[in-house]
Amino acid sequence: MPLSMLEKGVDGTVKNIRGKDETKRFLTSLGFNIGGSVVIVSEISGDLIVKVKDARVAISKSLANQIIV
C-alpha cells in the first residue's frame, strides 16, 4: 500500500519506490531506501511529516503515494 495510507505512528517498511528515475533518486536522497523503516509522525493539510533514518522529513501526499510500504 502507498505510504500515504499508513496509519499515524505505525512502523512501515519501504518495499518499493515508484515513479520516474528522478523521483526515485530524490526520495532515496531523503533516506527512503528499500527495506528502510518509516513512520508517519503527523499530517498537515494532506502533506506528511515522516520519520526516516532518525530524521523528520516533510513530503507531499503525491510523493507519499510513490512510496510502497
Image (tube, rainbow, N blue to C red):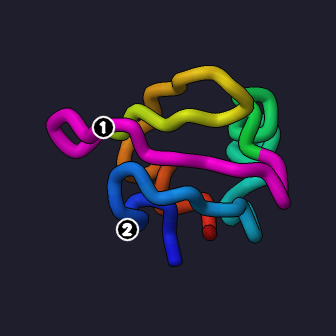
What is the number of callouts on the image?
A: 2
Percent x, y of residue 58: 44, 27
Q: Which amino acid, mark 1?
A: Ser
In the rendered structure, which disc, 1 or 2, sits on the residue that comes first in sequence?
Answer: 2
Taking the image as shown, residue 9 lies to the left or right of residue 66, namely left
Q: Which amino acid, mark 2?
A: Met
Q: Between residue 63 and residue 8, name the one nearer to us.
A: 8
The residue that disc 2 covers is 5
Q: Between residue 12 and residue 15, name the one nearer to us.
A: 12
Q: Residue at x 82, y 48 (%)?
A: 33
Q: Residue 68's quadrant in the figure?
A: bottom right
Q: Residue 32's quadrant in the figure?
A: top right
Magenta stretch holds residue 37: yes
Q: Between residue 15 and residue 21, name the one nearer to us.
A: 15
Is residue 18 positioned above or below 31 on the image? below
Q: Residue at x 46, y 58 (%)?
A: 10
Q: Which residues fall within the magenta stretch? A: 33-47
Mark nearest the camera among 1 and 2 is 1
Q: Residue at x 40, y 32 (%)?
A: 49
**Dominant secondary structure (helix, strand or loop) of the stretch shown in magenta:** strand
The residue that disc 1 covers is 42
What element does badge 1 sit on? strand
Percent x, y of residue 51: 55, 34
Q: Tag on residue 15?
A: none
Percent x, y of residue 7: 35, 62
Q: Residue furthest top?
A: 55
